Amino acid sequence: HAKGVLFFYWGYNRSAYTRSNIRFEGPGCRFELEDVIARDRQTPFDTDIYLHHTKFTIPQYNISIGYHLKEGLSLSFNADHMKYVMVANQKSKITGFINVDNSRYSNSYDGELITLTPDFLEFEHTDGLNYLNMELTRFYELTSGKNQKLLLSCFGGVASGLMMPKSNIRFLGEGSDKFHIAGFGVSADVGLSLNIWKWWGFQYKLKSGYINMPDILINTSQLPDRAKQEFWFFEHLLSIGAAIPINVDK
């Protein structure tokens, strides 16, 4: 954690999300679904995926590239690749109207319960719920071995950045699947860092934050153009990394 050290970490996460209201707006539709439940979708461990040079980015992953500005203080760029999947066939209150030709869902709604079946709505950020952020992190040494060949530290950080999901959304069978800057996020985290022989490291991190996406792309010709939602997320992740001394203070 000395000044002048560049570091890189790669890892995988599990995540959870609070319930959220999702609002759809576009030609012929303006409605809101209340308290929608969603889960993550981590890929079960398979060496053919996690250790494959072209497939290892399929699971929910994390990248961190940073630099120690001074002793124990770093600035990093992070990409948190989470996945957000609306639970199918749940019931939600719906308010607003749908006016689409030849649809059995065309109606005015005032808080009625509706079952979110796949023929009505599929709502996912599965490639993924991408949180691109800058983080300022403070490290505190807990214990170290001889010549710092083994160093255990705790750390805490704060971050903010852009949400760039690739949202797979199907409303009444039509939708989109494109990368799009949809909003922003802010977060804080705490964790433990274990460094071995100074330049190899492992990190375990707990992270929580707020996501606001007022411009989720749907991009259909007759159906809603945009959706918006906000929620809190919780994430835990394990990473492995390396440090490269560039201009280390002696």
Image (tube, grey):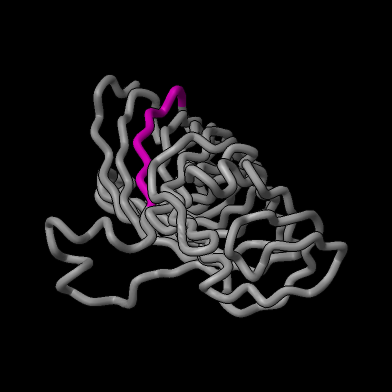
* In-front residue for pair 44/250: 44
- Residue at point 66%, 47% (across, down): 28
| In the image: residue 38, left or right of residue 196 | right
Residue 203 to residue 27: above or below: below
Is residue 204 in view from this perspective? no
* In-front residue for pair 206/94: 94
Q: Position of residue 168 (x, y in %)?
A: 44, 56
Q: Which quadrant holds the C terminus?
A: top left
- Residue at point 58%, 34% (across, down): 160
Residue 210 to residue 238: above or below: above
| In the image: residue 11, left or right of residue 232 | left
Q: Position of residue 239 (x, y in %)?
A: 36, 56
| In the image: residue 55, left or right of residue 74 | left
* In-front residue for pair 201/136: 136
| The stretch drawn in magenta includes residue 66 | yes
The span shown in magenta is 62-70
Query: Residue 171 falls in which quadrant of the image?
Result: bottom right
- Residue at point 59%, 57% (across, down): 101
- Residue at point 33%, 63% (across, down): 59
| In the image: residue 140, left or right of residue 44 | right
Q: Position of residue 1 (x, y in %)?
A: 40, 36
| The stretch drawn in magenta includes residue 150 | no
